[in-house]
């Protein structure tokens, strides 16, 4: 039998129903995998074995009665340490957060998973307050990529991506304010979905505002869709949330893509894509064509909105941390402290200008997408680089992590659904990601194309060395 910790959530619930194995056996297998590997990968903030086994035993009783609590009952699940979990300190990768306070509420996505019987294994690492595209923090140190521990898993949901890639759990929950689900999914060879903004309720709202999304990070597209069915359910605390539409996101409509119109932009007008990555992505696009999609090579004609995003993001950091006492500011990640200081020069006119430019970008993309179901780009222009660094060599520090993530943060500004699906490996054995961007509110088309591509390729079945 395949090790239980490598089974998908979809296969686990089928196995529970047929009594092939139990939630307790699966939880123990996942805990053992964490114990074997997390000293190397450092993806976990905290693991609570006694609590895990108590949840698993309760799930086992429900399955024995034939009364599961929901579609993910008994499925091991990991939560990024930016999302509130009742009874757990949510420290956000920061030494400035006081753990001695009431932790008495679940974030909406966490609440929905709990209501459906998911087994919470623990919390995953994040850079401080999720501020950058790699995962290291003053609180938890450096998180590493299972494909090569000398490399970064990306961020800010790097703990969730590394954990999923290493077989810790089939379901992991991430957040994405500028690529923080898709960047680490691309670097670690898993599937990550940033749903349409408001599709998954969030509370409290991210300090970085309406660019931040909550979404699933999994080893298969089917598992992400299953998870989205749960976490997209309503929660009145989020006044930005979309009306609940009752959509079944596992309704992929078969394996072919006949009739789907795709615009392929090899570099989004940006350039600078690593040749190996560019080749893998182009090969992946050919697979989409072979599956029946109509593909045109076309850029949407947008400038990379570096300044727009930087103003909005930096201003959010200042609002969050600008009034910290001096003693606490000394505890911050030095690069984050620099961002907060730099943000002091942002004027009201600068901010309002960024809001205006964001609106123009969103309008431009809405119009462009009237002609296409999907826009496809690389997830990242480069493979994973050295762990513990903010940017790869030669990318400079002025933009912090924005200089090497040109394909992700534009679509946080536009709030469109977007996903990264693994599309092969470089000659050094590092994963590459295919980036699928959908029309606003059309999350199902993103999942449909990703699922069809996944079924036609072997990449999601490949495990990191030694795992």
Image (cartoon, rainbow, N blue to C red):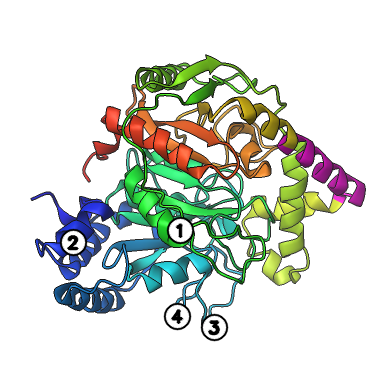
Q: Quadrant of residue 410?
A: top right
Q: Is 350 inside the magenta-drawn segment? A: yes
The circle on residue 125 is: 1
Mark 4 burial class by Cα count in 10 Å: few <14, some 14-19, many 20+: few
- Which residue is disc 3 drawn over? 100
Instruction: Check whether the beta carbons of the residues at disc 4 and disc 2 lie within 8 A of each other.
Output: no
Which of the two labelled residues, at mark 4 and mark 2, occupies the earlier sequence position? 2
Front: mark 2 or 1: 2
The circle on residue 29 is: 2
Instruction: Check whether the beta carbons of the residues at disc 4 and disc 3 lie within 8 A of each other.
Output: no
Which of the two labelled residues, at mark 2 and mark 3, occupies the earlier sequence position? 2
Name the element at disc 2: helix
Q: Quadrant of residue 20?
A: bottom left
Name the element at disc 1: loop
Query: Picture coordinates of residue 100 (x, y %)?
Result: 54, 83
How far is the residue under mark 2 from the one under mark 1? 21 Å
How far is the residue under mark 1 from the one under mark 4? 18 Å
Query: Picture coordinates of residue 37 (x, y %)?
Result: 27, 54
Which segment is the magenta one?
345-362
Q: In this picture, is 459 found above or below 233?
A: above
Q: Residue at x 72, y 63 (%)?
A: 320
Q: Is 322 inside the magenta-drawn segment? A: no
Q: Main secondary structure of the magenta part?
A: helix
Which of the two labelled residues, at mark 2 and mark 1, occupies the earlier sequence position? 2
How far is the residue under mark 4 from the one under mark 2? 24 Å
Which of the two labelled residues, at mark 3 and mark 1, occupies the earlier sequence position? 3
Mark 1 burial class by Cα count in 10 Å: few <14, some 14-19, many 20+: many
Q: Is residue 51 left or right of residue 230?
A: left
């Amino acid at each position: 039998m395949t090790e239980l910790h490598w089974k998908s959530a979809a296969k686990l619930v089928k196995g529970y129903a047929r009594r092939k194995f139990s939630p307790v056996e699966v939880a123990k297998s996942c805990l053992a995998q964490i114990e074997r590997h997390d000293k190397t990968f450092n993806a976990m903030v905290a693991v609570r074995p006694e609590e895990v086994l108590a949840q698993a035993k309760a799930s086992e009783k429900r399955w024995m009665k034939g009364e599961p609590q929901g579609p993910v009952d008994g499925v091991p699940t990991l939560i990024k340490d930016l999302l509130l979990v009742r009874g757990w300190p949510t420290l956000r990768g920061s030494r400035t957060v006081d753990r001695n306070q009431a932790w008495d509420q679940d974030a909406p996505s966490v609440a929905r998973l709990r209501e459906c019987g998911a087994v919470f294994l623990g919390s995953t690492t994040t850079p401080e307050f999720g501020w950058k595209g790699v995962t290291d923090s003053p609180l938890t140190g450096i998180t590493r990529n299972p494909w090569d521990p000398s490399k970064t898993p990306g961020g800010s949901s790097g703990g969730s991506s590394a954990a999923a890639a290493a077989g810790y759990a089939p379901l992991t929950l991430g957040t994405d304010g500028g690529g923080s689900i898709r960047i680490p999914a691309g670097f670690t060879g898993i599937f990550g979905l940033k749903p349409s903004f408001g599709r998954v309720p969030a509370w409290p709202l991210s300090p970085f505002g309406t660019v931040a999304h909550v979404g699933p990070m999994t080893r298969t597209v089917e598992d992400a869709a299953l998870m989205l069915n749960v976490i997209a359910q309503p929660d009145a605390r989020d006044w930005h949330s979309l009306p609940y539409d009752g959509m079944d996101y596992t309704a992929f409509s078969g394996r072919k893509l006949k009739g789907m119109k795709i615009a392929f932009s090899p570099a989004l007008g940006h350039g600078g894509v690593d040749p190996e990555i560019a080749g893998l992505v182009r090969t992946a696009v050919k697979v989409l064509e072979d599956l029946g999609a109509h593909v045109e090579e076309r850029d949407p004609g947008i400038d990379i909105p570096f300044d727009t995003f930087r103003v909005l993001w930096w201003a959010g950091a200042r609002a969050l941390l600008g009034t910290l006492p001096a003693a606490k500011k000394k505890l911050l990640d030095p690069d984050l402290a620099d961002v907060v200081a730099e943000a002091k020069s942002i004027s009201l006119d600068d901010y309002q200008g960024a809001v205006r430019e964001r609106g123009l970008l969103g309008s431009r993309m809405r119009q462009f997408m009237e002609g296409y179901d999907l826009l496809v780009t690389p997830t990242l222009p480069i493979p994973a680089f050295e762990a513990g660094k903010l940017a790869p060599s030669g990318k400079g520090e002025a933009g912090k992590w924005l200089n090497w993530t040109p394909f992700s943060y534009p679509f946080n500004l536009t709030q469109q659904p977007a996903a990264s699906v693994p599309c092969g490996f470089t000659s050094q054995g590092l994963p590459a990601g295919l980036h699928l961007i959908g029309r606003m509110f059309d999350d199902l088309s993103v999942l449909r194309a990703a699922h069809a591509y996944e079924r036609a390729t072997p990449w999601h079945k490949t495990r990191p060395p030694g795992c």
